[in-house]
Amino acid sequence: MIETDQKYHWMLGLGELNEQKIAELRSKPINVQMEIIRAVMKNERGISQAKKDSLMELQYGIDTSNFIRAYNIIKQHGYPGNEPDIGNISTILLHADPGRLPDDFYELLLGEVSQKRLKAKQYATIYDRIQIAKSQPELYYIIEVHNAETGKTEPKNPFNLHQTDSARKKNRA
């Protein structure tokens, strides 16, 4: 699962199909990578929109299959953690299609937090990432974004500070 999780993401983000060039671009400072990604998103650089659409469709299929497998593993055996042979399952969960989440998804993950198999910060990151995908405000404000003015990555300011503080305390995020 982990091997396929990022199969097309970097191609899409950096607008490049050549793996050697992708590795070269990934070695550049984060601010340079972000400039490239912005240019690719605006179709000012990189592969054509048609190629991006094809890659996105392929990646969506991988993400959907991986999510279903990861969800079933957690449901049957509990959150497996981040052992080297398993990889980081939370990365797969970050790519979940928010319109296709099982009804018990958040409850299942919160149970894993209470069992100490999933870190509260990982849960908060997954929750907020899915909120962003749904164009909804974040709750935990854990995810850091690149600030073009400062050149640093930092969390955004909470929309509702009281709600964010309460959620962080409740789930120890």
Image (tube, rainbow, N blue to C red):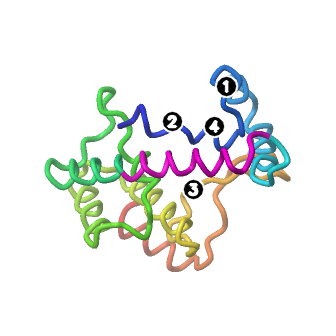
Question: Residue 10 at what x, y percent from top left?
Answer: 61, 38
Between circles 3 and 1, the one closer to the viewer is 1
Question: Residue 42 at what x, y percent from top left?
Answer: 80, 54
Q: Amino acid at mark 3?
A: Ile
N-terminal of the pair, mark 3 or mark 2, is 2
The circle on residue 7 is 2
The circle on residue 18 is 1
Neighbourhood count class around disc 1 (C-alpha, 10 Å): few under 14, some 14–19, many 20 upward? few
Answer whether labels 3 and 2 touch (C-beta < 8 Å): no
Question: Residue 105 at what x, y percent from top left?
Answer: 30, 65
Q: Is residue 145 above or below residue 33?
A: below
Between circles 3 and 2, the one closer to the viewer is 2
| Alpha-carbon span between mark 3 and mark 4 | 22 Å
Q: Quadrant of the C terminus?
A: bottom left
Answer whether labels 3 and 1 touch (C-beta < 8 Å): no
Q: Secondary structure at mark 2?
A: loop
What residue is shown with label 4?
Answer: 11
| Alpha-carbon span between mark 1 and mark 2 | 12 Å
Residue 46 appears in which quarter of the rendering? top right
| Alpha-carbon span between mark 1 and mark 4 | 8 Å
